[in-house]
Amino acid sequence: MFYSLSRLIRQVRRRKELGITLLLVLIVVAIGGNTLSFYLFESEANPDITIWDSIWYSVISVTTIGYGDFSAESLGARIGTAIFIVLIGLATFTTALGMAVDWVADLRHKERKGMGSVNARDHLVMVNFPNEGRVQQIIREYRRDPDHRSIDIVLVDNDVDELPFDLPDVSFVRGWPLDEDTYKRANLEHARQVMVLSPSHEDPRSDSLVASIAFVVHQVNPDVRVIAECLDSRHAVLFDSSANLSLVHGLEVVNNLFVQESQDSGALRLTQAITSNEIERNLASTVVQSTPPRTTYTNAAKVLLDHGVNLVGVIRDDSVHMDFDDIEVLRGDLLVYIGKSRLKPEEMDALLRQDDR
């Protein structure tokens, strides 16, 4: 009999749907049966006992708490307690606790292994895991900015068996990055941004994979902004079919910085400073949403500088302008500047309107 009971409990714990249903039925039977037996037998000796007292006694007993404010005195109530509480209730309750522990452990295991789905909203999806050090550095830098400090981050990769670190609000989804189901599990539909890292700086085919990932991402969510790493600027043509996408030529920028530092000492330190969220002032960008009174960027730069905003360049139609002479401010221009904070479009427009010359 003991073997049969143990086998039944194991089967119940393995088959969750059947187990939960059976446990609920047994708990109801245990509490209901003991409530009726306790009320029927104990109320004869103590008429003050109500049905609610019987329910309270049954619930407290089956959870093994036992306050002691009620106890079975009559033979019938004691037999009922032995059957419904000791034999049925306690076994059911302990089994339920075991299933709950198993469920939490299984859920945690799936999270670490990337086997589950995430319920994040307005989050960052980071695709590919080149190495732990680089991924952690990107996460730290991303969260140094006050506007992104509390944003959830979902890592997507197929080669990592288990997330090697445990950071708050960082989840992991393991899956092939060209499979739409992977992004459904990452809740890409409600994501704010997607970063696609190059899986390897040594593999010249990495750019084609990154371009394919960007295409699949926009198939799932056409409106999400994608920041993709492109190792070779000659491969930028691979990304021409992707809208709402920014390319980062990381290796090219690093090589340029090496040359600049060799020619002019200090350029590297300044670049490191303005591209990090760790310092008080850094690079930012804001789109001009409304056309201000007729003015050039030469005059606008002076107005912005009076308010602690150093205009570095203007991006218009994918062209970068750093010589502001005779360039009029137009709606849709992307202004890149160094400032203490990121200005909202309406804040930038208000500053530009201050120049009436």
Image (cartoon, grey):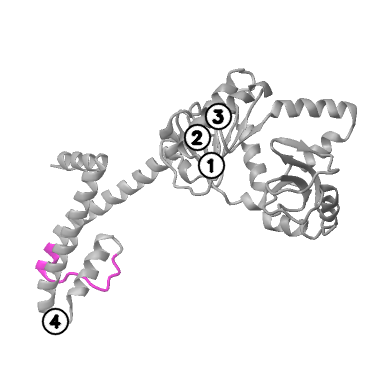
How far apart are the alpha carbons under marks 2 and 1? Answer: 8 Å
On the image, the x and y values in percent for residue 205 come to 58, 18
Mark nearer the N terminus (3 vs 2): 2
Mark nearer the N terminus (2 vs 4): 4
Q: Is residue 77 left or right of residue 9?
A: left
Q: Which residue is mark 4?
A: 47
The amino acid marked with disc number 1 is Val
Mark nearer the N terminus (1 vs 3): 1
Q: Label for residue 241?
A: 3
Q: Which residue is mark 1?
A: 224
* 103 up-or-down from 265: above or below: below
Q: Are marks 2 and 1 in contact (CB under 8 Å)?
A: yes
Mark 1: few/some/many CA within 10 Å (<14, 14-19, 20+): some
Q: For the residues carrying marks 3 and 4, which lies nearer the camera in this image?
A: 3
Magenta span: 66-80
Q: Is residue 199 in view from this perspective?
A: no
Q: Label for residue 217?
A: 2
The amino acid marked with disc number 2 is Val
Front-most of 50 and 205?
205
Helix, strand, or loop for circle 1?
Answer: loop
* Residue found at x 73% / y 55%: 348
* Residue found at x 80% / y 60%: 354
Q: For the residues carrying marks 2 and 4, which lies nearer the camera in this image?
A: 2
The amino acid marked with disc number 3 is Ser
The amino acid marked with disc number 4 is Pro
Residue 74 magenta-drawn? yes
Q: Is residue 197 left or right of residue 300?
A: left
Residue 156 magenta-drawn? no
Q: Which quadrant holds residue 138?
A: top right
Callout count: 4
